[in-house]
Amino acid sequence: MANPDPTVTTSCLYAVFRATGPDAPAGGGPAVDPAEAARRAIATLTLTEPGLLLDPDPAANEWGATAVGFHTWFHAPDPGVLHTSVTADGLTIDITATPGALTVDTGDGRRQTCHHTVPYRNPDGVNAPSPYCGHTWEHTGEYTVTATRTWDVSWTAAGRSGTDTVTRPAGTRAITVIELVSVLTEPDP
């Protein structure tokens, strides 16, 4: 299509990099954008999660459930920092992935972002709220608790560097919420 106004010129500049040195493909190879190669490499990373824990664990009690109004703590052990090198598009990409916040969808329409989690320690008696990451359900039912983790990823390749953020699954747990009812009775005479 011809430019309707000959006084206006349009140009687009794209950064093009040719891999050179020990990481270059034979014969000079095609132009490679290190940032794009890094994004593709990051997308394929396996970021291992230890899993989501519910504390106290509803599966460990006699009902296999938690109760309406009872505090459940969410805990995900720190998966640690991942350092790796990946070869993609003829480039060696050094990657460091640092675990960040945990986002927990409680299955009842609520979601929270947790920057810190700790295991349940029964502080100050039974049914204490988590100081960092927990929930109480208001209605009986079957719920699926789903957690995702945000990872901060930095990379270097061919003299360039950058950062990216990815979100990956961190665990899923099914939970049953029941209602406990107390019945007071007269002592036997």
Image (cartoon, rainbow, N blue to C red):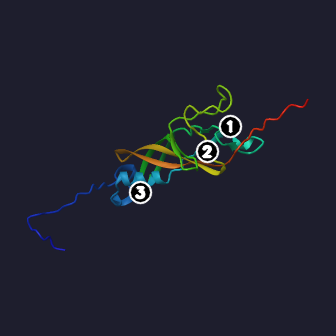
Q: Position of residue 83 (x, y in %)?
A: 50, 41
Q: Are marks 2 and 3 in contact (CB under 8 Å)?
A: no
Q: Gap between marks 2 and 3, in whole Å? A: 52 Å
Residue that lies at the very extreme toward the bottom in this rendered image? 1
Between discs 2 and 3, the one toward the N terminus: 3
CB atoms of marks 2 and 1 within 8 Å? no
Q: Amino acid at mark 2?
A: Glu
Q: Residue furthest right?
A: 189
Mark 1 → mark 3, Cα distance in angstroms: 48 Å
What is the three-letter code of the residue carrying label 3? Asp
Badge 1: residue crowd in 10 Å (few <14, some 14–19, many ≥20): many
Foreground mark, 2 or 3, reads 2
Q: Residue at x 60, y 39 (%)?
A: 74
Identify the disc placed on residue 15.
Answer: none
Q: CA distance from mark 2 to mark 1?
A: 17 Å
Q: Position of residue 176 (x, y in %)?
A: 68, 48
Secondary element at image label 3: loop
Q: Is 62 positioned to the left or the right of 111 in the image?
A: right
Residue 13's place in the image compared with 177, above or below, is below
Give the mark, 1 or 3, whose residue is nearer the N terminus.
Answer: 1
Residue under pointer 2: 138
Front residue of 2/172: it is 172
- First along the sequence among labels 2 and 1: 1
Report which residue position mark 1 lands on. 56
